[in-house]
Amino acid sequence: MIGYLRKNFPSSVTSETVKKFSLAPNNESYVINALQFIGVLDGEGKRTKTGHDIFVLGDDAFPKSFEGLIKDSYSDLFEIRGDDAWTLSRGELISYFRTTDKTSEVIGGRQAGLFQAFRSLAGYAQANENPTKNSSSKPRQTKPRAASPKKNAETKVKIDKPLIQEAAGPSRRDMAMTVRIEINLPANGSQETYDAIFKSIRANLIDE
């Protein structure tokens, strides 16, 4: 939203303004509240002089001026943590907001996310935390994950093993028996559970 307002900051911003940009569906009021919190909109949603003066700045000058705006808005946080506030982890931010405002974990998480977005715009983006730029790098290559057993999956293990050894004496023929074992894997089992099951099969039936 700030990116759009830097291009064209109308005299007032309402929920309808946010909707036109297809941002935060059904949560437009949160966007308005955030802009009011940092002082670029007044209580009636009208553009403030401070907001206008900062948002018309170019890309080189904007981050530094926006930094001052954020430090003023979060004065308590910076009074306690100083410039370290720019580098606090999400967990540390949630802890701070929950302790200070007596909020729930969900609200504390939203407050932390908002501060992270603001500090990115001020030039203090942390790893994987820059909402103002679209990454042009190639997608990270990840190793394919092994397929997990399906719920209530039934695994059939066929083991061909002679259970009766050749008997002494020329009159007896070689005898062998094929055993088919069916294993019902628990639907809520972990990878360790499945590994233990097959390890036991190998130890007690195959390698024995």
Image: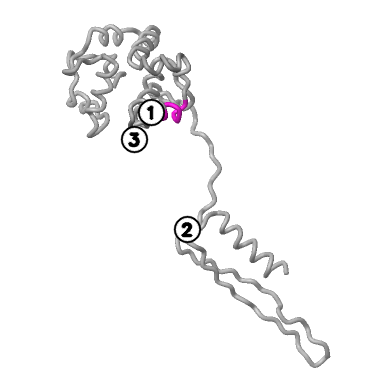
CA gap between label 2 and label 1 equals: 36 Å
Residue under pointer 1:
99
For residue 20, which quarter of the picture?
Answer: top left
What numbered label is drawn on residue 104?
Answer: 3
Q: Residue at x 24, y 26 (%)?
A: 21
Neighbourhood count class around disc 1 (C-alpha, 10 Å): few under 14, some 14–19, many 20 upward: few
Q: Magenta residues?
A: 89-95
Neighbourhood count class around disc 2 (C-alpha, 10 Å): few under 14, some 14–19, many 20 upward: few
Which comes sooner in the sequence, label 3 or label 1?
Answer: 1
Name the chief secondary structure element in magenta. Answer: helix
Residue 92 or 206: which is nearer the viewer?
A: 92
Which numbered disc, 3 or 1, marks the residue closer to the eye?
A: 1
Place of residue 57 in the rendered image (x, y in percent of width and height, measured from the top left) = 32, 7
Residue 111 or 162: which is nearer the viewer?
A: 111
Place of residue 62 in the rendered image (x, y in percent of width and height, measured from the top left) = 36, 10
CA gap between label 3 and label 2 equals: 30 Å
Quadrant showing the N terminus: top left
Q: Is residue 71 left or right of residue 163?
A: left
What numbered label is drawn on residue 188?
Answer: 2
* Callout 1: SS: helix
Which comes sooner in the sequence, label 2 or label 1?
Answer: 1
Residue 63 or 79: which is nearer the viewer?
A: 79
Q: Amino acid at mark 1?
A: Thr
Q: Residue at x 23, y 14 (%)?
A: 9
Q: Marks 2 and 1: CB-CB under 8 Å?
A: no
Which comes sooner in the sequence, label 3 or label 2?
Answer: 3
From what the image shows, is residue 75 above or below residue 136? above
Q: Amino acid at mark 3?
A: Ser
For residue 166, which quarter of the picture?
Answer: bottom right
Neighbourhood count class around disc 3 (C-alpha, 10 Å): few under 14, some 14–19, many 20 upward: few
Which numbered disc, 2 or 1, marks the residue closer to the eye?
A: 1
Quadrant showing the C terminus: bottom right
